[in-house]
Amino acid sequence: MVERVYDVTGMSCAACSARVKRTMDKLESVSHCEVNLLTGKMTLDYDETALDFPQIQAAIEKAGYGVREPEPENVQPEKEEEQERTASSRRLLVAAICAAPVFYLNISHMIPAITPPVPAIFHIYPVLNALIQLVLAFVVLWCGRGLFVRGYRSLFAKSPNMDTLVAIGATAAMLESLYAAVMIALGNSAYLHRLYCESAAVVVTLVMAGRYLEERAKRRTGDALRALEALRPNVAHVVRGGVTVDLDASRLSVGDEIIIRPGEAIPADAVVLEGRTGVDESMLTGESMPVEKREGSEVIGGSQNLDGSIRARVTAGAGESVLARIIKLVEDAQSRQAPVARLADKVAGIFVPAVMGIALLAAIAWAIAGQSVDFCINVAIGVLVVACPCALGLATPASVMTGTGRSASLGVLFKSGEALERLAGIRTVVFDKTGTLTWGKPVLTDVVTYGMERDEALSLCAAAETRSEHPVGRAICRAASGMALREVTDFTALPGRGVEAKVEGVALLAGTRSLMEERGVDFSAAKADEDRFYAEGKTLVYAAREGKLFALFAAADELRPESRLLVKRLGELGIQSYLLTGDNSMSARAAAAQCGIPESRVIAGVLPGKKAETVAQLRRQSPTAMVGDGINDAPALTEADIGIAVSGEGHGRATDIAVDAADVVLMHGGLGQVYDAIQLSRASMRNIRENLFWAFAYNTVCIPAAAGVFYAFGGGLLNPVWAGAAMALSSICVVSNALRLRWYRPKALDTAKS
């Protein structure tokens, strides 16, 4: 099976996307299909040995739509899109200019109390009035011919859509108007009231205006993605044979040496060979503060070099860079449906045929009730025009696209709309300890000496540990940085136990309790201290000089400062936190106590292979998210309902490590982004529910109003022109509501209300 993304053309509403999905699902070689109305993209999983693109194209074209393979990366369709938008605005302008006088001449049809003045010649020659209206109406229909082409093509393909409803309604109005014009020409001026040119012209104009505004609003939902794409640098300064030449950044290869000058965008992922600078990575990671870079530091393509010139070696090609993968991640999230969208798709699949049936039944019912032909036509056209599956189809993808785009700008990357939805329903969060709740590297926390000054003891032990690679030994050396260097000879590493050496000619031993026992060192003086440190879950190093204990060092993997507050805030959201770690239970319980996680929710001593099984057990009790560093936790991240990979210092970049395992990637690395991600997902789901409510409510009220249900009980009848305005307004309202997410700002951990 392979996954491919295709561009589908000709879709105008949720009924269209539902039809395309049904068409693909009928093909035996297709295992999964998703169609996004907002982006016009179809994601298809299929057996490429049994199905090829021409077969896919034939099936979709038979359904009444078009399909094409995505443009290569080096092809820029923006110019063509801009030209189409310009042409669309011109057609709308011409249609509006022509529809205005038609509306004026027939305003009394809609508001009987208003009879606008018209030139006297229209009363003398009513046929002139009819001909002018017909000509202007046909100009409008020509400007909106795309609606008719798509509408009737879909109808003949037995997949009617929103355009079909508009096309049938406008056609019926124009046919009736043509008949009335003929009767007027034959001398029956009473047929002036049977002209429905305004219904056709104004409705088509309003639909065009609604689509134009809708497209503008929809385009804004992708602003975050376009901002990321704009970060791609165009030019790179490459060192070739000692000479610096300018090349297209897309042609850079792994191993190329590049120069990045102050104020320039970094053209590719690279490692710094020479120089120091500050780099602004805010658009990629959400971190507002510049990040210092020096020799050996990694820089991300697309980030901004600030104040220094650096020389670097390229580590990833254009298509494999962090920026490229982030863009791909956001694109995938915006093209994939959230499960809640399936409800809209199911409704839309039967919506348009049902509306056509309602329009016909309403017209017949009023004819049987004795109403005039004019009234029945008005009712049928009104029902056809007011029904709007557009709003229904846009409700979910507009929110998902805006929500994932806003999340990306804050450094939270969702892999799919499904991940966005599922995270909102999480009730349990499982945290890895090392590198997630903690920094992932031990720091020296305590020094207890026996018959020696603290600094003297620290200096002696650090000297012995200088050549050691053990993490605790490195922590002791870091704590002693800045102290005077001591002469070290006869250094020997004792794997798993410690080190021995001569410091300034005196034998020194540093290591575990078992090493002290082995060498006959009396450590009874440290009994009370070691019991206390063990209870706190700390790692101990004993130091002896000439066989006598002189110090006890305690080190611990320090908790991240935001860990405790995050657990508290999650509790306020109704989410319980668990600690899952391979460390010993004493260390795990100590870390959990500092975070505020109850001992009953601490699961310690779990090997990486068993973490996934533990997460599976928890998710059977409630929806569960796993937060880890994306390396050893990959199986557990995959097993959870939502896997959240934390990036940043101490992890490597999560886009390189955990993007395949996790559903959500936190680029900034701070645990506060877990809180951000949950808030963003819940805000997006609220927005989706609001959109779906208003889309359903709109149709629930407007279709009966257009069918004359309220009129039958003494109320008013929804005129086709006002029906068209309401239809256009509903789609604009849904997309505009989704756009509110662009300005959503999650509460910070330290400012959220308790």
Image (tube, helix red, strand yellow):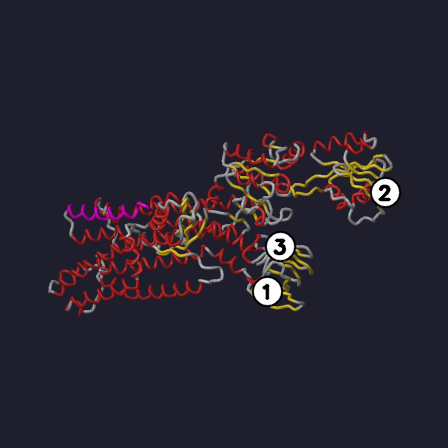
Name the residue tied to disc 1.
236
User: For the residue carrying disc 1, how many other residues have a C-alpha within 10 Å: few (<14), some (14-19), or many (20+)?
Assistant: many
Looking at numbered disc 3 in the image, what kind of residue is underneath it?
Answer: Met
Name the residue furthest front.
Answer: 49
Q: Is residue 27 magenta?
A: no
The image shows residue 375 at horizontal and vertical percentages of 19, 52
Gap in angstroms between the C-alphas marked 1 and 3: 25 Å
The residue wearing badge 3 is 289
- In whole angstroms, how far apart are the C-alphas of marks 2 and 1? 53 Å
Q: Considering the image in quadrants, where does the C terminus appear?
A: top right
Dot 2 or dot 1, earlier in sequence: 1
Q: Quadrant of residue 186?
A: bottom left
- Disc 2 crowd rating (10 Å Cα; few below 14, some 14-19, many 20+) is many
Image quadrant assignment for residue 451:
top right
Residue 638, visible in the rendered structure: yes
The amino acid type found where label 2 is placed reads: Lys
Whether residues under marks 1 and 3 lie with C-beta atoms below 8 angstroms apart, the answer is: no
Bounds of the magenta span? 349-369
- Tell me how far mark 2 sits from mark 3, CA to CA: 45 Å
Please, is residue 240 above or below residue 340 in the view?
Answer: below
From the viewer's perspective, is 468 left or right of 35? right
- Nearer to us in this view, 221 or 7: 7
Residue displayed at 35% across by 66% down: 90
The residue to which callout 2 is attached is 502
Q: Is residue 522 above or below residue 309?
A: above
| Amino acid at the residue labelled 1 | Ala
Is 539 placed above or below 406 here? above
The local crowd at label 3, few if under 14, some if 14 to 19, many if 20 or more residues have their Cα within 10 Å, is few
Q: Is residue 392 visible?
A: no
Q: Looking at the picture, how far across and down is residue 101, in whole percent?
A: 26, 65
